[in-house]
Amino acid sequence: MAPHPFIRPATEQDLPAILDIYNEVLLNTTAAYVFEPHTLEMRQRWFQELKSAGWPVIVSEENGVVTGFGNIATFRNKPGYRYTGEHTLHVHADHRGKGIGRALLQALIAEAHRCELRTLVGAIDSENAISLRLHAECGFVETARMPQVAWKFGRWLDLVLMQLLLPGPKTPFAP
């Protein structure tokens, strides 16, 4: 069995590796409904926005090489959703199938607890059976299936929303 991947907070120095992973996903999979590769400047802006809002960005690392990344971000930009986060995670193509996605997801769940979220949402392409199964095994439940909401690679794609209910804050409040 492979050793448990080392998970840590991402740093600015990780952004080129995160960019490479993300762009491979964009160009070759339906895991993200984005068409054009991102630039390093775009990833830097993304990183700064998440960090300044207090959201976590994490990476998995093996022998000093970033093998995957994940983050939690705002689910919807409305005050009533303040205790709901949406997560993203992607694993480098050469490191898939080694348990890295599970380790990242478990670390993101721990971060969601730390952020006192009530709900953690994953938006997953319906054809991504591995991710759907992983999320189910980690306690996520399918709460919506949205047929043909995206177009990529010359076909319509269905989006599955999965959510994990968490304890949330001890004393929730509305601003």
Image (tube, rainbow, N blue to C red):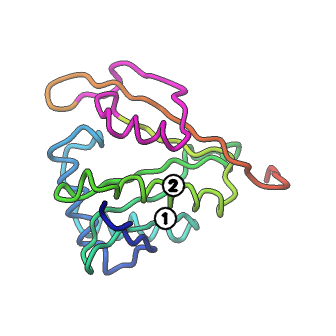
- Residue 25 located left or right of residue 103: left
Look at the numbered disc 1 and give the secondary structure of its residue: helix
At 41% from the left and 73% from the top, the residue drawn is: 10
**Crowd tier of the residue under label 2, counting other residues whose Cα lies within 10 Å: few below 14, some 14–19, many 20 or above:** many
The question of residue 133 being in magenta is answered with yes
Q: Quadrant of residue 54?
A: bottom right
Label 1 belongs to which residue? 50
Outermost right residue: 171
Task: Give how far apart the Cα atoms at labels 2 and 1 are.
Answer: 7 Å
The x, y position of residue 20, in whole percent, is 20, 63
Outermost top residue: 147
Question: Which residues are drawn in magenta?
Answer: 125-151
Q: Quadrant of residue 3?
A: bottom left
Cβ–Cβ under 8 Å for marks 2 and 1: yes
In the depicted structure, whether residue 154 falls above or below residue 21: above
In the depicted structure, whether residue 148 falls above or below residue 1: above
Q: Which mark is residue 73?
A: 2
What amino acid is found at the position of numbered circle 1 in the picture? Leu
What amino acid is found at the position of numbered circle 2 in the picture? Ala
At 44% from the left and 71% from the top, the residue drawn is: 48
Q: Which mark is residue 79?
A: none
- Residue 24 located left or right of residue 117: left
The question of residue 87 being in magenta is answered with no
The x, y position of residue 50, in whole percent, is 49, 64
Q: Earlier in the sequence, mark 2 or mark 1?
A: 1
Image quarter of the N terminus? bottom left
Query: In this orientation, which residue lies closer to the viewer: 57 or 40?
Result: 57
At 32% from the left and 38% from the top, the residue drawn is: 130
At 85% from the left and 54% from the top, the residue drawn is: 171
- Residue 19 located left or right of residue 46: left
